[in-house]
Image (spheres, grey):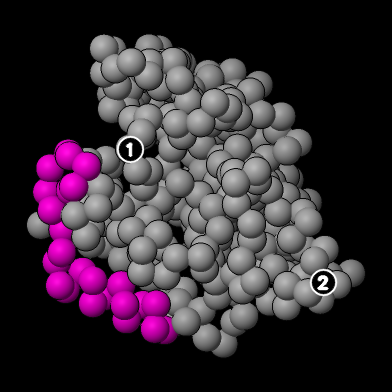
Amino acid sequence: KIHREWCCGHDEFIKWMPYKMTKYPAVVHVDIDFAFLQPMDELFDAIIYDSKSPEGQAARAQIEIEFPKEVTLPEKIDAFYTRDWPQVVPGRLPGYQAGFLVVRPDPSVHDELEKIVLEGNYTGGYGRNNGWGGLGYGGFVGAMAMQGLMAYYYDHVRPGTGVELNQCRYNWMGMDTRYRAHPNFHKNNPKVGKCRNDRDYCEDCMVTDVKKIKNVHFTECRKPWNCVGIGVKGGAKGKAIDTNAGSYEKCMELVRLWHGYRTDFENKLYALTKDESVRKAQSGVYKTEIFMGHCHGEGGVNYTQIGGSDESFAQVPKIYEMP
């Protein structure tokens, strides 16, 4: 039944492959709708270096975790991830957010995950005894696939080996962290308006200063290449930014940043090649203060892909050559 799961079925299990990439000391997986705004060397160093080494201690001091007052970093860190708190009903278990994972490669993890899936110990439904292991890891998007499986795995199969990062810094999606609108909203729930993490405090990612955000996952804010420049309550079935669940203004700020990255690449490619087709792909007129000439109107059909001949693209490595 996993292949029928809403976001994103058994195809998501390709995300186990980093555990087999043993030629590297640490491996990052992210979804394609992702942008890096700052380096995150502190995560790599915390995996690579001993916790008591100067390098390891320096790295750990820079890591921002979700519950710093409750959690102590383990001596050996095997994985970093964020959880999908914006989906959670207060008091229920959160899923793992499947678009971001930093791991220490270990083929035995891949094999254990495969074994869990093949055993099929998953209870359907929405109760507290549903999901993987019958322990409550179900009833949310992706519960039968990566979102539920990985949360169960790091909580119960290998507890104390993974670290949950601050969702407003890493894998930022900008969704409301309070329980006051969908998803999974019930207006008669006594915890309406409270933090979805069931604590007294939760940072509001919708207003996090961009300077503090390490990387962005374009989910609530829609894909930058979808040319979504409007916001309405409910999100118009994915055709607009859902202002019940996120901030239109913050989303536009981050989408503009993505288009700024594309513009920077285009300008460098044009300077190198003088290929006019690069410039032609910057001629869109829709909300140019946000989309920077890459959109001709609202919606993905109005997105213009990066221009350039095959000969021009063959020179891209020159852009990134170290001096």
**What residue sits 64% from the left and 61% below the top?**
73
Residue at point 36%, 77% (across, down): 110
The answer to whether 118 is drawn above or below residue 31 in the figure is below
**Compared to 119, does 123 lie above or below?**
above
Of all residues, the one furthest to the front in this rendering is 70
Say whether residue 17 is left or right of residue 296. left
Q: Nearer the viewer, residue 318 or 110?
A: 110
The answer to if 84 sits in the magenta stretch is no
Q: Which dot marks residue 166?
A: none
Residue 229 seen: no
- In the displayed structure image, the side of residue 238 where residue 131 appears, left or right: left
Q: What amino acid is found at the position of numbered circle 2 in the picture?
A: Glu
Q: Is residue 306 left or right of residue 136?
A: right
Q: Which residue is disc 1 drawn over?
A: 92
User: Based on the displayed image, in which of its 4 quarters is residue 205 positioned?
Assistant: top right
Name the spot of residue 292 as percent of width and height, x first: 63, 29
Residue corresponding to mark 2? 55
Is 54 located above or below residue 37 in the figure?
below
Q: Residues within 10 Å of mark 1 (few under 14, many from 20)?
A: some
**Residue 100 in the image: x percent, y percent?**
49, 55
Residue in front for this viewpoint, 15 or 292 = 15
| Residue 214 at x, y percent in the picture | 67, 46
Task: Report the magenta residues as a range.
Answer: 107-130
Rendered image quadrant of residue 319? bottom right
| Marks 2, 1: nearer the viewer | 1
Q: Which residue is at a point 77% across and 70% down the rendered structure image?
A: 56
**Which residue is located at x 36 percent, y 69 percent?**
157
- How many angstroms separate mark 2 from mark 1 (CA)? 37 Å
Asked if residue 200 can be seen in this view, the reply is yes
126 magenta-colored? yes
Q: Secondary structure at mark 1?
A: loop
Is 55 displayed left or right of 125 in the figure? right
